[in-house]
Amino acid sequence: EAGVAQSPRYKIIEKRQSVAFWCNPISGHATLYWYQQILGQGPKLLIQFQNNGVVDDSQLPKDRFSAERLKGVDSTLKIQPAKLEDSAVYLCASSATDGSSYEQYFGPGTRLTVT
Amino acid sequence: AQRVTQPEKLLSVFKGAPVELKCNYSYSGSPELFWYVQYSRQRLQLLLRHISRESIKGFTADLNKGETSFHLKKPFAQEEDSAMYYCALRPGNTGKLIFGQGTTLQVKP
């Protein structure tokens, strides 16, 4: 099966600019996650979608970050305006929620550098 | 507080030596724990989960609730085991994962 797709793979922007990342999960996977991974740290969940509804966005900095998953498939994560501390790898993951498996499949990530 | 701690940033061993990657967790409920691995230039992927009690690529991990630990072990390290390893906790019936900081395993020839 095709894996989780993300684009772009790399992005360099100046602080106060805006940026958007795109994720296409594995076909049929109802749950989609966005993680932020700062250099030297493990991934941290930003937001979790179940189909097109938000399950958990408790760690999403809502003053500058937004995410949507229209039609319950693809998702976009936006940062506006970006700060230097937003430099990180943004990982998208998906999982099938059939009650027996929560294995998350990760995309390649988008590396964001804010200068 | 829900937290995963991996005390070692880097673990360097020689090929054929035993490996133990440490993981401790903090969680008040019944935890579900995982080990994820990221090989060079590859995606983060699941290595094993505690409920499966399986051995993958020679690795095993036992959940010790008394010590709140989930250490990853392999009796004889191989060069292809060199990678970044993350321990992760899934709290309750949510899907989200709480990751540790990761440990880089370097297996020298």
Image (spheres, coloured by chain):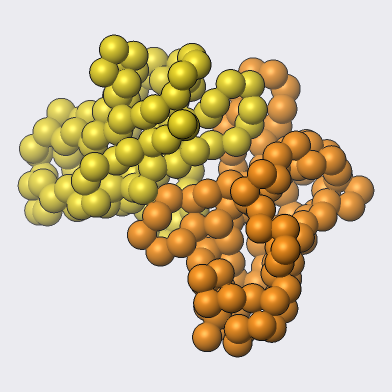
Chain colours: A orange, B yellow
Can I make out residue B82 in this image?
no
Q: Quadrant of residue B67?
A: top left
Q: In the orientation shown, which residue stands out farthest toward the right?
A: A71
Q: Position of residue A21 (x, y in %)?
A: 70, 67
Could you say which is closer to the camera, residue B57 or residue A85?
A: A85
The residue under the point 16% across, 35% down is B19
- Is A88 displayed left or right of A54 in the figure? left
A4 up-or-down from B63: above or below: below
The residue under the point 91% across, 48% down is A71
- Is B76 displayed left or right of A50 in the figure? left
Q: Position of residue A18 (x, y in %)?
A: 72, 78
Q: Position of residue B105 (x, y in %)?
A: 23, 48
Q: Position of residue B35 (x, y in %)?
A: 40, 34
- Is B107 displayed left or right of B90 in the figure? left
Could you say which is closer to the camera, residue A49 or residue B79?
A: A49
B28 up-or-down from B79: above or below: above
B60 up-or-down from B11: above or below: above
The residue under the point 83% across, 51% down is A69
The residue under the point 39% across, 27% down is B26
Could you say which is closer to the camera, residue A33 or residue B59?
A: A33
